[in-house]
Image: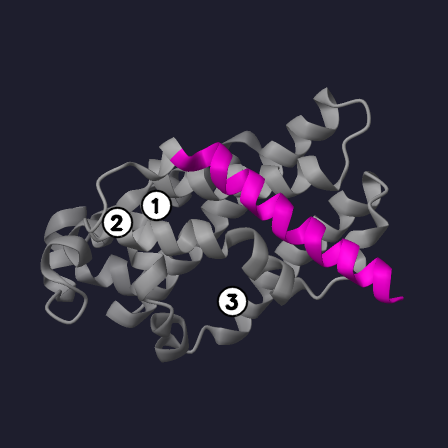
Amino acid sequence: MGSSQKKITDKTRQKQRDALIAALQCFTEHGFEATTIEMIRDASGMSVGSLYHHFGNKEKIASALFREGMRGYARIVKQYATDLMANSPEPGLEQGIKMLVYANVDWISGNPDWARFVFHHRFTVTQSGDEGAFRGDISDFRKMLSSWARFMGVAEFDSLDINFVSSLITGPTHNYARQWLAGRVKTPLSEHREAFAEAAWAAVQGVLIKGSSTS
């Protein structure tokens, strides 16, 4: 790819991201149902034709917003995992579990409106017909985690059900995050970062110990 073509691609991607951020502002302020494509047009500076060209209808924009939020979280996980492997001589399961909690807490804390949308608008992916693409995103993310675990020599990770382990790791963090994002609790999620990391490790460790004692 030539430099001029790359610049065009980067410019287009930035334009699309700016449009998604504008859409997020509209959904946050007016709610998903009340937001119109014209509102997103006015907030983004894009024409309705451009919005349809880059995304599609409102449901497609919402789906793209949801998926971009999940990808943003995945990018943080990838960066944290890279840093962990580069800076820890022998990283193990405990460090990896805590790293996933840190990534969750940091992404939610840094992107509260986006996190709120992701928590409450999973249905937009189904409505838009993007379910297959989203499953591909999830598959890619899980492959990344498995590759990271194998690199660190963590055999235990592959022996556990990913959905069950994910609930152990992120369940308490997400439960508190929902309350914080809704304004029901005032202490920021970030202030409990270490406590949630320790709790996640204790939960996973308990399952591993129980499993080894019954095997």
Q: Distance between the residues labelled 3 and 2?
A: 24 Å
The local crowd at label 3, few if under 14, some if 14 to 19, many if 20 or more residues have their Cα within 10 Å, is: some
Q: Which of marks 3 and 2 is nearer the N terminus?
A: 3
Badge 1: few (under 14), some or many (20 or more) residues near its Cα, within 10 Å? Answer: some
User: Mark 3 or 1, which is nearer the eye?
Assistant: 3
Span highlighted in magenta in the image: 192-215
Q: Which amino acid does label 3 sit on?
A: Phe
Tell us which disc is closer to us: 1 or 2: 2
Q: Mark 1 or mark 2: which comes first in sequence?
A: 1
Q: Residue at x 28, y 53 (%)?
A: 179
Q: Name the residue under label 3.
A: 134
The vertical placement of 198 against 212, above or below, is above
The residue wearing badge 1 is: 17
The local secondary structure at tag 1 comes to helix
Q: Which residue lies furthest to the right in this view?
A: 215
Q: Where's the C terminus, which quadrant?
A: bottom right
Is residue 18 something that shows in the picture?
no
